[in-house]
Amino acid sequence: MYSSYLKFSLNKIWTFDDKNQAYIPQFLAFAIVAIGGLLINQAILYLLHEKIKLNFYLAKFLAIGVVTIWNFGFSNFLVFS
């Protein structure tokens, strides 16, 4: 929990320079976006590595790219807008 709140705080202060004081609703939205990213990551890994038999590290690299875009995009437009 501490790690998630630290990530949220750093994103709020540093990445998005957000001045909104609604910490709890924003943190919950941030957690939902992060859980969505985790689910997408696992789905991509399962599809690419288990089903298509792509090298695990290449599949992980692609999953990281997709989830990075997901997390930043949804954090930018939904959490810290």
Image (cartoon, rainbow, N blue to C red):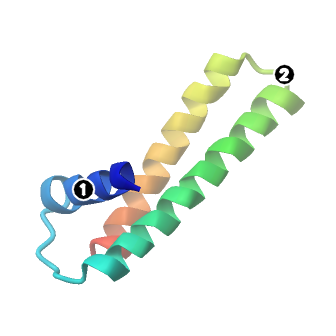
Q: In this view, which residue lies farthest toward the right?
A: 51
- Crowding at mark 1 (Cα within 10 Å: few <14, some 14-19, many 20+): some
**On the image, which quarter does residue 50 sit in?**
top right
Q: CA distance from mark 1 to mark 2?
A: 35 Å
Q: Which mark is residue 63?
A: none
Residue at screen point 32% across, 58% down: 5
Residue at screen point 32% across, 65% down: 76
User: How far across and how far down the image is residue 73, in percent?
Assistant: 40, 59
Residue under label 2: 53
Look at the picture and state if 31 lies above or below 39. below
Residue at screen point 21% across, 53% down: 10
Left or right position of 68 against 50: left
Left or right position of 67 against 79: right
Of the residues shown, which amino acid type is indicated by label 2?
Lys
User: How far across and how far down the image is residue 35, in percent?
Assistant: 56, 59
Look at the picture and state if 34 lies above or below 60. below
Q: Earlier in the sequence, mark 1 or mark 2?
A: 1
1 or 2: mark nearer the eye:
1
Quadrant of image for the N terminus: bottom left
User: How far across and how far down the image is residue 63, in percent?
Assistant: 59, 37
- Crowding at mark 2 (Cα within 10 Å: few <14, some 14-19, many 20+): few
- SS assignment at label 2: loop
Q: In this view, which residue lies farthest toward the front?
A: 2
Residue under label 1: 11
- SS assignment at label 1: helix
Q: Are marks 1 and 2 in contact (CB under 8 Å)?
A: no
Across the whole image, how many numbered discs are drawn on residues?
2
Quadrant of image for the C terminus: bottom left
Look at the picture and state if 24 lies above or below 3. below
Left or right position of 81 against 74: left
